[in-house]
Image (cartoon, rainbow, N blue to C red):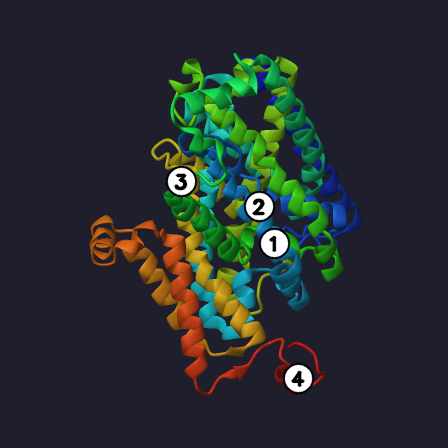
Amino acid sequence: MNIVLVLVVLYNVLVIGGIGLYLSQRDNASGQVTDMATGGRNANLAMFSVTMAITYLGSAHVYGLMEMSFVMGAVALWFSFAHTILMCVICLGTGQWVRRLGCATIPELIGRIYGKQMRTITACISAMVVFGLVTLETQTLGIGISAISGWALGWAAVVGAILGTAYVTIGGIKQTMWVNLVNAIVMYASIIIAGIYLAFVLPEGWEGVRQHYVTNGQDYKLSIFGTPDLLVGFSLAAVFSVVFAQSVNQQGMAAAMSAKDESVIRRSLWIAAPANGLFGVFPVLCGLAAATIPEFAALGPKLAGATLVVKLLPTWLVVLVQAGFLGALLSTFAMSALAPATIFAKDIVGANTKGGLTPEQEMRLIRRVIIIVGSLSAALTFYNHPNVIRAITWLFAWLAPLFFIIVAGLFWKRSTKVAFVVVICSWLINCVWSIGPIKQFAVSIVPGTAVLENAHITAITAFVLTVALYTFAKNTKPALFSDAYLQEQPTGGLA
C-alpha cells in the first residue's frame, strides 16, 4: 500500500480516535452524557475561532478551488474572499444572536420567532441542504485519497466517509473542536512550506506559470478580477450565496451555539477571518500551475491540482499537506454530518415527541443519523460527481431567504404569514431558475439576467419580498430584540 496513504490515515486515526476516546472516557467518569450538539456550551476562544475557520475550509476551498482555478483562473479566490466577509458577519452578527437566545439549531431559532410550523418547514429544507454539502465533502475526500493512493474515486470516498464519521461520532462537536486545534497547526505549517517548495520544483518556477498564461493570451486568469462575466457571474454569486446562506447555516452556527459566551464569538474575528481567508491562496496556485504542465493538465480539473501536489513534493511534505487537507475536509464533513443529525433529533423528532427526548436518547439518535448520512453520501459518490463550487452555491441559494426573515424577526417585526410567503416564493424561484429552458426564456426577454445565478435571484427575491411585505403587513408582532418585545416579558428578558 502507498506509504503516504498509510501515514496520512494513521495520523488521522491516532488524532481522531485518541481525542474522541479521551473525551468519551472523561464524560463517563464524570457521569455526564456526551452533548453531541453543543458540547456543554463552553468552547473557549481558541476552540471556537479555529473551528469557525476550519469548518468553512471544506471541499470548495481545498480541491474545489483547485478545480475552479484550473478552469477560470485566480478569480476563483473570490470564494475565499466571500468567506472572509462571512467570518465578519457571523462573529459580529448572527453568531452572537444565536448564542444570546440559547438555541441549538437554526430551525429552533426560526421557531422561536415564527412558530412551530415554520420550524418544521425550515428544518426539512436545512437538513436537505446540509446533506447535499456532506455528499460534496465526501467527493473531495475521495479526490484527496484517490490522488494519494491511485484508487477509484468511489472507494477512496468510502475511506474518507469512514474517517469523517469517526471525526464526530464519538465525542460530538467537542471532539471536532479539539481535533481541529491539532489539524490547524499541521495544515497551515504544511501549506506555507509547500508553497515555497513548489517555487523550486515547478519546471520553470512560478514565473513560468505566469508566462504560460501571458503567452497564450490568458493573462486574465492571473487576475482576481478575471473577466466582467466571471466577476459578476461567479464572484458576486459566491459572495451572495456564501454570506446570506452560511451565516444562518446549521453547519457553522453549531460552533457559535457551543461558544462560552458572546464575547468569545466577537473576539474570535481576529483569528477566524485571516485564518480562513488566506488558506485559499495555496489551492488556487496549485490549480493554476497544474493547468500549465501537460502531465497534470491531461488529468482534467478534478485531479490535476491534487496530483501535482503528490507528484512534485517530497514524501514527508506530501504527508503533512495531505494530512492538513484531509483535516480541513474531515472537519467540514464532520460539522456537515452533525448538522442534519442535530436538526433531525431536535427539530423533527424531539420537537414533536411529547416530553422531548432524554439526553441519552438524543445522543444515540444523533450518532445513528451521522452514520446513516455518512454511508449514504459515500454511496452517492459512486454515481455523481458535480462541479463542487457550482453545486455548493446552488445549495446555498436555498438558505438565503432564512437570513432575511431572521434579521427581520429579530430587529424589525414578526409575521409568520409573511415569513412563509418569503421562503416559499424564494424556493420556487430557485427551482424555476434551475430549469434550463425557463432560464433561457427569461434571458431572451431580459438579456441582463443572463449573468444572474441562483444565488443572485434567490437573495434578491427574498430581500425584496421581505421589505415589501413587512412594510405593509398588518397585525405583526414586535421583533425579538426590540424594546417592545422585551417589555412584554414577565422578567423583561427573552422568552
Query: What amino acid type should be assigned to the residue bearing mark 4?
Result: Gln
Seen from the viewer's position, the closer of residues 221 and 380 is 221
Give the percent coordinates (x, y) of residue 357: 58, 61
Q: Earlier in the sequence, mark 4 or mark 2?
A: 2
Asked if one can make out residue 166 in the rendered structure from this viewpoint, the answer is no
Q: Which residue is mark 4?
A: 489
Give me the C-alpha separation between circle 1 and circle 3.
Answer: 37 Å
Q: Which residue is mark 3?
A: 227
Q: Which numbered marker is on residue 335?
A: 2
Query: What amino acid type should be assigned to the residue bearing mark 1?
Result: Ala
Give me the C-alpha separation between circle 1 and circle 4.
Answer: 27 Å
Seen from the viewer's position, the closer of residues 316 and 163 is 316
Q: Secondary structure at mark 2?
A: helix
Query: What amino acid type should be assigned to the residue bearing mark 2?
Result: Met
Mark 2 residue crowding within 10 angstroms, few (<14) / some (14–19) / many (20+): many
Q: Earlier in the sequence, mark 1 or mark 3?
A: 3
Give the percent coordinates (x, y) of residue 474: 44, 87
Give the percent coordinates (x, y) of residue 92: 66, 60
Seen from the viewer's position, the closer of residues 268 and 440 is 440
Q: Is residue 473 left or right of residue 25?
A: left
Give me the C-alpha separation between circle 4 and circle 3.
Answer: 54 Å
Circles 1 and 2, Cβ within 8 Å, touching? The answer is yes
Query: What amino acid type should be assigned to the residue bearing mark 3?
Result: Thr
- Is the residue 360 above or below the residue 20 in the image? below
Q: Secondary structure at mark 4?
A: loop
Asked if one can make out residue 193 in the rendered structure from this viewpoint, the answer is yes
